[in-house]
Amino acid sequence: MKRRDFIKKVGVGVAAATAATAAKAPYVIAKKKYFWKMVTTWPPHFPVLGEGADKFAKWVEELSDGRMKIQVYGGGELVPALGVFDAVRSGNVEMGHSASYYWAGKAPAAQFFAAVPFGMNAQEVNAWFYGGNGWKLWKELYASFGLVPFPAGNTGVQMGGWFNKKINSIDDYKGLKMRIPGLGGKVIAKAGATAVLVAGGEIYTNLERGVIDATEWVGPYHDYLMGFYKAAKYYYYPGWHEPGTVLEIMINKKAWDKLPKDLQAIITTAAARSNIWMLSEFEAKNEYYLEKLVKEHHVQLLKFPDDVLKSLKKHAKEAIEELVEKDKTGFSKKVYTDYMKFFNQIEKWHKISENAYAHALSL
Amino acid sequence: MKRRDFIKKVGVGVAAATAATAAKAPYVIAKKKYFWKMVTTWPPHFPVLGEGADKFAKWVEELSDGRMKIQVYGGGELVPALGVFDAVRSGNVEMGHSASYYWAGKAPAAQFFAAVPFGMNAQEVNAWFYGGNGWKLWKELYASFGLVPFPAGNTGVQMGGWFNKKINSIDDYKGLKMRIPGLGGKVIAKAGATAVLVAGGEIYTNLERGVIDATEWVGPYHDYLMGFYKAAKYYYYPGWHEPGTVLEIMINKKAWDKLPKDLQAIITTAAARSNIWMLSEFEAKNEYYLEKLVKEHHVQLLKFPDDVLKSLKKHAKEAIEELVEKDKTGFSKKVYTDYMKFFNQIEKWHKISENAYAHALSL
């Protein structure tokens, strides 16, 4: 995929409801057929994220022997990219594919189910979902909106972002205008930066023209396709603000409750497959694109200095505690408490397993 | 589960074919029903591994709305624990649940699809399977035995094992009798130790009576249930010999080819769900049991010294290269080359993502 095509997809597409209408034509069979719509936050067929949504729909059709067909819409095709939550909540569409931190304005606690600065990585957050209380709490939160959530993908540890000046000390954040959404934005604001919200399709131009000084996106594979290397020199790591971002599938609860048990099991299982597929896809491709960036495009790969990371970590704790404090429903506190309890436990285990093993490999 | 019950399960059970026979009773329906048998290497309902096999069977039944029922047999119930490969290959049963390093005698290259000392961890090996050539190569290898393989679980980084003397230098391996199967055993043999094969149910007694000086098993959760803390003082980490052991499902190819497409998709998808579930289950429980071991049973948790790990790593490389050299089919070489190419790439990426992030957290 060329950068030009990729960028086009990041822009907003046109409504394309024709296929869905056709799919509603009568069809006589013994078992009831289901024709659902899934709106997504991603451009149509967007690498990994949109592909993940497409694959999920294809798997559900295969698994159900054609009894359930899901028509996937890119962001802006049926509803705006960030209109997914409301569209599914209202029941206008049955299903959505997105990331829960986009709904922080409606449910602050939702952020804990997507990405927490200096929080859990992919393997840890999956253990929290499937082996701890994570998914249970997420279901509880979404139930109050008439929704059912599913973990359905993960980006792994992201990159720290693209900068046009070096970050040598925490003071270098002062006055910096950076495109960075969610809690990450709140963290750098505490260091004196201005967090700017820019839609995917406009980041490159903004960066090139100096409207923003820096941006984060995902990781080498996606960032390469976005062409940021043409507009920024320094590529920082690690992505402390998104150490294992979870992609979600959400379903309107009334639509869900009407599904027979086997189709419910099919959706649940296809979502789990999507979760492991998406992470694997990012992980398998990142280094290849990172090397292209460094070798072919002479990007300077830089590590955030330890002092900077230490300060950001302190600010992250403050930002999260403020969010918890502000959420008068008390749900953020409930989720944060469970999240941290699980994280502290698994972090201890990973010190002597994953981390000690990484050390052994480095010898 | 009590240690006594757990140990009983590690022993060999009795044949229990009754249920399978009953399942073959005629049943008139429109779509063909499938009643399959799955033999496993694990004791019946063995925590995580056996549970994973049970869950997989339950999911397949749910997903297929009862069209496919899989009767799960513990090791020794229908065929011996290590008779899984031959039983599925012959077509006597349709399906097996095990780990591919057990078949090293028949196909040396099979070891690369289970565990490689100083090799890839769970997240990396999944990226190799789903986003690289790993699964493709595994299918190619198993096809020559009339089998179809699926990744279906992972233990994560294991522990290094239980010892009754401290390992202060590589010389402490000289004369050490340790229960450690597969390539790990070949590695410590190079350091002068004797690798002993002991069935799960007999390890504890052998360790207590001094027949062996040391043993490895899985990780804190399983090891606690095995009661090894009563027979050994020192618990070493990290498990350099099994950094992300893959559990497998294998299917007789003729039986597989006769399945309709939707049931094939159901098995494929349920296996992926099992893969992520099993790892999450181990990961969520290990620290809890590790703390019980240390706090309640005063186990001494010790890290292998760097010098020891360095020597073991060198021996591991030698052992793997010997295996590759000896495999006259050339397939081990083909797999090892691809494995190492992928590993080198993803290891570079993990240095600046996962590992750099773990460092940031430690500040």
Image (spheres, coloured by chain):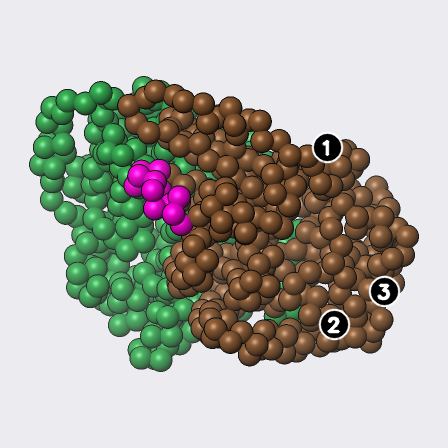
Chain colours: A brown, B green
The circle drawn on residue A166 is: 3
Picture residue at 45% right of the left edge, 73% below the top: A334
Q: Which chain is indicated by disc 3? A: A
Among the 4 quarters of the image, the one containing residue A68: top left
Cα distance in 3D space between marks 2 and 1: 35 Å
Please state which amino acid type lies under the numbered disc 3: Lys
The dominant secondary structure in magenta is: helix
Q: Badge 1, how many Cα within 10 Å: few under 14, some, many 20+?
A: few
Q: Badge 2, how many Cα within 10 Å: few under 14, some, many 20+?
A: many
Q: Are marks 3 and 1 in contact (CB under 8 Å)?
A: no
Q: Position of residue A325 (x, y in %)?
A: 55, 79
- B144 versus B243 height, above or below: above
The circle drawn on residue A1 is: 1
Between disc 3 and disc 1, whose residue precedes?
A: 1
Q: Which residues are magenta?
A: A253-264
Picture residue at 34% right of the left edge, 42% below the top: A258
